[in-house]
Image: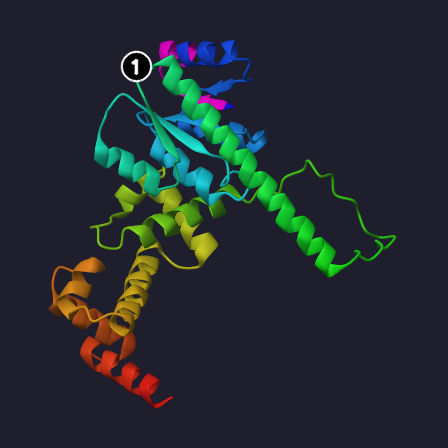
Amino acid sequence: MLIVDDEREELRVLTDLLRRQFYHVRSAADGAAGYQSALAQPPDLILLDVRMPVVDGFAACRLLKADPVTRDIPVLFLSALDDPDERVAGLAMGGVDFITKPYHPAEVFARVRIHLELAGVRAAAAAAVVAAAAVIAGPAPAPTPQATPVHPDIHFHPHPDAVMTDAAMRLIDDNLAAPLTLAGIARALGTYEKRLSQAFRQQAGITVFAYLAEARMMRGRQLLVDTDMSVQQIAEQIGFRSAANFATAFREHADATPTAYRQSVRQTIGHS
Protein backbone atom coordinates (compact mmCIF):
# COMPACT_ATOMS: atom_id res chain seq x y z
CA MET A 1 0.00 0.00 0.00
CA LEU A 2 1.01 3.66 -0.37
CA ILE A 3 1.07 6.21 2.46
CA VAL A 4 1.25 9.91 1.54
CA ASP A 5 2.02 12.38 4.35
CA ASP A 6 4.32 15.40 4.59
CA GLU A 7 4.81 14.99 8.36
CA ARG A 8 7.83 12.71 8.71
CA GLU A 9 7.12 11.52 12.25
CA GLU A 10 3.48 10.69 11.53
CA LEU A 11 4.53 8.94 8.32
CA ARG A 12 7.08 6.87 10.26
CA VAL A 13 4.57 5.92 12.97
CA LEU A 14 1.93 4.74 10.50
CA THR A 15 4.47 2.93 8.32
CA ASP A 16 5.87 1.07 11.33
CA LEU A 17 2.37 0.12 12.53
CA LEU A 18 1.43 -1.42 9.21
CA ARG A 19 4.75 -3.14 8.58
CA ARG A 20 4.39 -4.91 11.93
CA GLN A 21 1.23 -6.43 10.49
CA PHE A 22 3.32 -7.66 7.51
CA TYR A 23 1.87 -5.20 5.02
CA HIS A 24 4.14 -4.09 2.19
CA VAL A 25 4.27 -0.30 2.56
CA ARG A 26 5.90 2.46 0.56
CA SER A 27 5.58 6.20 1.14
CA ALA A 28 5.56 9.63 -0.46
CA ALA A 29 6.03 13.02 1.20
CA ASP A 30 3.52 15.11 -0.78
CA GLY A 31 0.45 14.80 -2.96
CA ALA A 32 2.26 15.19 -6.28
CA ALA A 33 4.83 12.53 -5.42
CA GLY A 34 2.08 10.25 -4.15
CA TYR A 35 0.12 10.57 -7.39
CA GLN A 36 3.23 9.83 -9.47
CA SER A 37 4.11 6.85 -7.25
CA ALA A 38 0.60 5.44 -7.65
CA LEU A 39 0.86 5.83 -11.43
CA ALA A 40 4.23 4.13 -11.63
CA GLN A 41 3.20 1.19 -9.45
CA PRO A 42 -0.51 1.12 -8.56
CA PRO A 43 -0.93 0.02 -4.93
CA ASP A 44 -3.82 -1.95 -3.46
CA LEU A 45 -4.68 0.91 -1.08
CA ILE A 46 -3.71 4.56 -0.59
CA LEU A 47 -3.60 6.31 2.79
CA LEU A 48 -3.63 10.02 1.97
CA ASP A 49 -3.10 12.92 4.36
CA VAL A 50 -5.55 15.78 3.82
CA ARG A 51 -3.39 18.71 4.95
CA MET A 52 -0.28 19.03 2.81
CA PRO A 53 1.33 22.05 1.08
CA VAL A 54 0.84 22.74 -2.65
CA VAL A 55 -0.86 19.47 -3.69
CA ASP A 56 -2.98 18.52 -0.68
CA GLY A 57 -4.83 15.26 -0.17
CA PHE A 58 -8.04 16.40 -1.81
CA ALA A 59 -6.18 17.68 -4.89
CA ALA A 60 -4.25 14.42 -5.14
CA CYS A 61 -7.47 12.42 -4.81
CA ARG A 62 -9.09 14.37 -7.63
CA LEU A 63 -6.16 13.48 -9.89
CA LEU A 64 -6.19 9.85 -8.79
CA LYS A 65 -9.91 9.51 -9.50
CA ALA A 66 -9.59 11.22 -12.89
CA ASP A 67 -6.86 8.83 -14.06
CA PRO A 68 -8.00 5.44 -15.43
CA VAL A 69 -4.85 3.82 -14.04
CA THR A 70 -5.61 4.80 -10.43
CA ARG A 71 -9.31 5.63 -10.22
CA ASP A 72 -10.32 2.26 -8.73
CA ILE A 73 -7.70 2.25 -5.95
CA PRO A 74 -9.39 2.78 -2.54
CA VAL A 75 -8.31 6.05 -0.89
CA LEU A 76 -8.47 6.45 2.89
CA PHE A 77 -7.89 10.01 4.08
CA LEU A 78 -5.73 10.79 7.11
CA SER A 79 -6.75 13.84 9.14
CA ALA A 80 -6.13 15.41 12.53
CA LEU A 81 -9.47 17.20 12.30
CA ASP A 82 -12.75 15.57 13.22
CA ASP A 83 -14.67 17.83 10.84
CA PRO A 84 -17.93 16.43 9.39
CA ASP A 85 -17.82 18.84 6.43
CA GLU A 86 -14.29 17.73 5.57
CA ARG A 87 -15.34 14.10 5.76
CA VAL A 88 -18.32 14.68 3.47
CA ALA A 89 -16.11 16.53 0.97
CA GLY A 90 -13.56 13.72 0.96
CA LEU A 91 -16.16 11.01 0.49
CA ALA A 92 -17.87 13.01 -2.27
CA MET A 93 -14.66 13.17 -4.32
CA GLY A 94 -14.10 9.42 -4.14
CA GLY A 95 -12.47 8.63 -0.79
CA VAL A 96 -13.80 5.52 0.93
CA ASP A 97 -12.98 6.31 4.57
CA PHE A 98 -11.17 8.54 7.07
CA ILE A 99 -8.60 7.63 9.72
CA THR A 100 -8.22 10.22 12.48
CA LYS A 101 -4.91 11.33 13.94
CA PRO A 102 -3.42 10.51 16.42
CA TYR A 103 -3.63 6.93 15.26
CA HIS A 104 -5.30 4.17 17.26
CA PRO A 105 -3.69 0.93 16.03
CA ALA A 106 -6.82 -1.22 16.31
CA GLU A 107 -8.83 1.30 14.26
CA VAL A 108 -6.11 1.60 11.62
CA PHE A 109 -5.83 -2.18 11.24
CA ALA A 110 -9.60 -2.64 11.07
CA ARG A 111 -10.18 0.04 8.42
CA VAL A 112 -7.24 -1.08 6.29
CA ARG A 113 -8.28 -4.73 6.46
CA ILE A 114 -11.92 -3.98 5.62
CA HIS A 115 -11.08 -1.89 2.56
CA LEU A 116 -8.48 -4.32 1.27
CA GLU A 117 -11.06 -7.10 1.55
CA LEU A 118 -13.70 -4.98 -0.22
CA ALA A 119 -11.23 -4.14 -2.98
CA GLY A 120 -10.54 -7.85 -3.41
CA VAL A 121 -14.25 -8.59 -3.67
CA ARG A 122 -14.72 -5.87 -6.29
CA ALA A 123 -11.74 -7.11 -8.30
CA ALA A 124 -13.05 -10.68 -8.23
CA ALA A 125 -16.50 -9.52 -9.33
CA ALA A 126 -15.03 -7.49 -12.18
CA ALA A 127 -12.94 -10.47 -13.30
CA ALA A 128 -16.04 -12.68 -13.24
CA VAL A 129 -17.92 -10.20 -15.44
CA VAL A 130 -15.03 -10.11 -17.93
CA ALA A 131 -14.85 -13.92 -17.98
CA ALA A 132 -18.61 -14.23 -18.53
CA ALA A 133 -18.47 -11.71 -21.36
CA ALA A 134 -15.64 -13.67 -22.97
CA VAL A 135 -17.69 -16.88 -22.83
CA ILE A 136 -20.67 -15.14 -24.43
CA ALA A 137 -18.51 -13.57 -27.15
CA GLY A 138 -16.84 -16.86 -28.01
CA PRO A 139 -13.17 -17.52 -28.74
CA ALA A 140 -11.09 -14.57 -29.83
CA PRO A 141 -9.77 -14.58 -33.41
CA ALA A 142 -6.18 -15.66 -33.89
CA PRO A 143 -3.77 -12.71 -33.85
CA THR A 144 -2.42 -11.55 -37.19
CA PRO A 145 1.32 -11.91 -37.81
CA GLN A 146 1.69 -8.13 -37.64
CA ALA A 147 0.04 -7.88 -34.23
CA THR A 148 2.36 -6.78 -31.44
CA PRO A 149 1.71 -8.52 -28.12
CA VAL A 150 1.02 -6.20 -25.21
CA HIS A 151 2.54 -7.10 -21.87
CA PRO A 152 -0.29 -7.51 -19.34
CA ASP A 153 1.56 -5.50 -16.69
CA ILE A 154 1.92 -2.43 -18.90
CA HIS A 155 -0.65 0.27 -18.03
CA PHE A 156 -1.88 2.89 -20.42
CA HIS A 157 -0.90 6.24 -18.93
CA PRO A 158 -2.92 9.18 -20.28
CA HIS A 159 -1.17 12.52 -20.68
CA PRO A 160 -1.00 14.47 -17.39
CA ASP A 161 -2.82 17.39 -19.02
CA ALA A 162 -5.69 15.06 -19.97
CA VAL A 163 -5.95 13.86 -16.37
CA MET A 164 -5.89 17.43 -15.06
CA THR A 165 -8.56 18.52 -17.53
CA ASP A 166 -10.80 15.59 -16.65
CA ALA A 167 -10.36 16.34 -12.94
CA ALA A 168 -11.22 20.00 -13.54
CA MET A 169 -14.36 19.03 -15.47
CA ARG A 170 -15.47 16.72 -12.67
CA LEU A 171 -14.85 19.45 -10.11
CA ILE A 172 -16.89 21.94 -12.12
CA ASP A 173 -19.74 19.49 -12.78
CA ASP A 174 -19.98 18.69 -9.06
CA ASN A 175 -19.93 22.33 -7.92
CA LEU A 176 -22.04 24.31 -10.38
CA ALA A 177 -23.79 26.19 -7.56
CA ALA A 178 -20.50 27.43 -6.11
CA PRO A 179 -18.84 30.73 -7.09
CA LEU A 180 -16.06 29.01 -9.00
CA THR A 181 -12.92 30.89 -10.00
CA LEU A 182 -9.96 29.86 -12.10
CA ALA A 183 -7.67 30.35 -9.10
CA GLY A 184 -9.91 28.22 -6.90
CA ILE A 185 -10.14 25.38 -9.42
CA ALA A 186 -6.37 25.41 -9.96
CA ARG A 187 -5.75 25.40 -6.21
CA ALA A 188 -8.15 22.47 -5.75
CA LEU A 189 -6.09 20.49 -8.28
CA GLY A 190 -2.73 21.49 -6.82
CA THR A 191 -1.64 23.46 -9.87
CA TYR A 192 -1.40 27.02 -11.19
CA GLU A 193 -3.91 29.07 -13.16
CA LYS A 194 -1.71 29.41 -16.24
CA ARG A 195 -0.93 25.70 -16.44
CA LEU A 196 -4.58 24.73 -15.93
CA SER A 197 -5.73 27.20 -18.59
CA GLN A 198 -3.20 25.94 -21.13
CA ALA A 199 -3.91 22.27 -20.42
CA PHE A 200 -7.68 22.76 -20.53
CA ARG A 201 -7.63 24.69 -23.79
CA GLN A 202 -5.33 22.15 -25.43
CA GLN A 203 -7.27 19.10 -24.24
CA ALA A 204 -10.87 20.38 -24.40
CA GLY A 205 -10.55 22.98 -27.15
CA ILE A 206 -12.27 25.63 -25.00
CA THR A 207 -11.46 27.74 -21.96
CA VAL A 208 -12.27 26.71 -18.41
CA PHE A 209 -14.97 29.37 -18.16
CA ALA A 210 -16.50 28.43 -21.51
CA TYR A 211 -16.85 24.88 -20.18
CA LEU A 212 -18.31 26.18 -16.91
CA ALA A 213 -20.87 28.30 -18.75
CA GLU A 214 -21.86 25.39 -21.00
CA ALA A 215 -22.11 22.99 -18.05
CA ARG A 216 -24.40 25.40 -16.21
CA MET A 217 -26.64 25.80 -19.24
CA MET A 218 -26.85 22.05 -19.83
CA ARG A 219 -27.77 21.45 -16.19
CA GLY A 220 -30.29 24.28 -16.36
CA ARG A 221 -31.95 22.75 -19.42
CA GLN A 222 -32.11 19.37 -17.72
CA LEU A 223 -33.70 20.83 -14.56
CA LEU A 224 -36.23 22.81 -16.59
CA VAL A 225 -37.39 19.68 -18.39
CA ASP A 226 -37.12 17.06 -15.65
CA THR A 227 -38.27 19.00 -12.58
CA ASP A 228 -40.90 21.50 -11.49
CA MET A 229 -38.37 23.73 -9.79
CA SER A 230 -38.93 27.46 -10.21
CA VAL A 231 -36.59 29.48 -12.42
CA GLN A 232 -35.17 31.10 -9.27
CA GLN A 233 -34.47 27.70 -7.69
CA ILE A 234 -32.76 26.47 -10.84
CA ALA A 235 -30.70 29.66 -11.03
CA GLU A 236 -29.44 29.06 -7.49
CA GLN A 237 -28.69 25.40 -8.26
CA ILE A 238 -26.36 26.29 -11.12
CA GLY A 239 -24.57 29.31 -9.68
CA PHE A 240 -26.54 32.37 -10.80
CA ARG A 241 -27.27 35.14 -8.32
CA SER A 242 -30.76 35.75 -9.61
CA ALA A 243 -33.43 34.39 -11.92
CA ALA A 244 -32.95 37.45 -14.13
CA ASN A 245 -29.24 36.75 -14.64
CA PHE A 246 -30.01 33.12 -15.45
CA ALA A 247 -32.78 34.11 -17.87
CA THR A 248 -30.47 36.49 -19.73
CA ALA A 249 -27.72 33.89 -20.09
CA PHE A 250 -30.21 31.18 -21.03
CA ARG A 251 -31.80 33.34 -23.73
CA GLU A 252 -28.38 33.83 -25.32
CA HIS A 253 -27.76 30.08 -25.12
CA ALA A 254 -31.11 28.67 -26.25
CA ASP A 255 -32.75 31.63 -27.99
CA ALA A 256 -35.69 31.34 -25.59
CA THR A 257 -36.53 32.24 -22.01
CA PRO A 258 -36.34 29.43 -19.45
CA THR A 259 -40.12 29.34 -19.10
CA ALA A 260 -40.71 29.28 -22.86
CA TYR A 261 -38.11 26.54 -23.29
CA ARG A 262 -39.74 24.41 -20.59
CA GLN A 263 -43.19 24.81 -22.14
CA SER A 264 -41.94 24.08 -25.66
CA VAL A 265 -40.08 20.91 -24.70
CA ARG A 266 -42.93 19.57 -22.58
CA GLN A 267 -45.45 20.22 -25.35
CA THR A 268 -43.19 18.39 -27.80
CA ILE A 269 -42.88 15.44 -25.42
CA GLY A 270 -46.62 15.44 -24.80
CA HIS A 271 -47.38 15.24 -28.52
CA SER A 272 -44.82 12.54 -29.28
Q: Crowding near pointer 1: few (<14 within 10 Å), some, many (20+)?
A: few
- Does 2 appear above or below 205? above
Residue 133 at x, y = what percent? Answer: 67, 55
**Residue 29 visible, this angle:** no
Question: Which scheme is used to colour this image of the protein?
Answer: rainbow
Q: Residue at x 11, y 63 (%)?
A: 242
The residue stretch that appears in magenta:
2-12
Q: In the figure, residue 32 lies in which quadrant? A: top left
Which structural element holds mark 1?
loop
Question: Does the magenta run of residues contain 230?
Answer: no
Q: According to the image, label 1 marks what residue?
A: 102
Residue 77 at x, y = what percent? Answer: 36, 28
Q: Residue at x 23, y 83 (%)?
A: 263
Residue 86 at x, y = what percent? Answer: 25, 34
Q: Quadrant of the C terminus?
A: bottom left
Is 74 positioned to the left or the right of 138 in the image?
A: left
Q: Looking at the picture, which amino acid does disc 1 mark? A: Pro
- Does 28 appear above or below 148? above
Please state which of residues 187 and 264 is positioned toward the viewer in this rendering. 264
Is 261 positioned to the left or the right of 104 in the image?
A: left
Q: In the figure, residue 235 lies in which quadrant? A: bottom left
Numbered circles on residues, count:
1
Residue 200 at x, y = what percent? Answer: 41, 51
Is 206 positioned to the left or the right of 135 in the image?
A: left
Q: Residue at x 13, y 66 (%)?
A: 232
Question: Does the magenta run of residues contain 9?
Answer: yes
